[in-house]
Image (cartoon, rainbow, N blue to C red):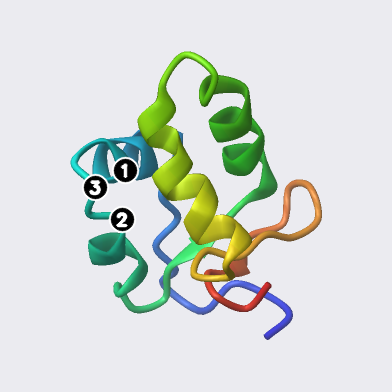
């Protein structure tokens, strides 16, 4: 898919961080029409040194459960 779906759900870093903190990131990646922007991955990467639980969200990104894309462009999660 090359763009965000209609009525996309775009979680910010706080949303992913909260699910990662309680070790249930899988609950958010199962939502329909979920998309992410690269800035979120950047913020998670910058925060992981002091907030180790962010590794849960970064692992999901690296494994393709949460996708990435070009700056300022939302892409469907899992379509990395």
Query: Marks 3 and 1, how far apart in space?
Result: 5 Å
Q: Quadrant of the N terminus?
A: bottom right
Where is residue 40 shown, x and y percent of the image? Answer: 57, 40
- Disc 2 crowd rating (10 Å Cα; few below 14, some 14-19, many 20+) is many
Q: Which mark is residue 23?
A: 3
Q: Residue at the far left: name it.
A: 22
Q: Nearer the viewer, residue 22 or 75?
A: 22
- Disc 1 crowd rating (10 Å Cα; few below 14, some 14-19, many 20+) is many
Determine whether, in the image, residue 40 is placed left or right of residue 30. right
- The answer to whether mark 3 and mark 1 are in CB contact below 8 A is yes
Q: Nearer the viewer, residue 38 or 51?
A: 51
Where is residue 55 shown, x and y percent of the image? Answer: 47, 40
Q: Residue at the far bottom: name it.
A: 1
Instruction: Label 3, secondary structure: give it.
Output: loop
- The answer to whether mark 1 and mark 2 are in CB contact below 8 A is yes
Q: Does 52 sit above or below residue 78?
A: above
Q: Which residue is mark 2?
A: 25
Query: Marks 1 and 2, how far apart in space?
Result: 5 Å
Instruction: Label 2, secondary structure: give it.
Output: loop
Q: Quadrant of the C terminus?
A: bottom right
Residue found at x 62% / y 59%: 62
Camera-near label (3 vs 2) is 3
Q: Earlier in the sequence, mark 1 or mark 2?
A: 1
Determine whether, in the image, residue 61 is placed left or right of residue 27. right
Q: Quadrant of residue 30?
A: bottom left
Residue found at x 41% / y 76%: 33
- Disc 3 crowd rating (10 Å Cα; few below 14, some 14-19, many 20+) is some
Q: Quadrant of residue 70?
A: bottom right
Q: Which residue is mark 1?
A: 20
Q: Which mark is residue 39?
A: none
């Amino acid at each position: 898919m090359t763009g965000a779906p209609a009525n996309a759900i775009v979680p910010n870093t706080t949303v992913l961080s909260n699910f990662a903190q309680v070790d249930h990131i899988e609950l958010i990646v199962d939502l329909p029409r979920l998309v992410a922007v690269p800035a979120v991955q950047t913020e998670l990467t910058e925060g992981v040194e002091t907030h180790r639980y962010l590794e849960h969200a970064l692992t999901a990104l690296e494994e393709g459960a949460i996708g990435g894309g070009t700056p300022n462009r939302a892409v469907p999660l899992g379509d990395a």
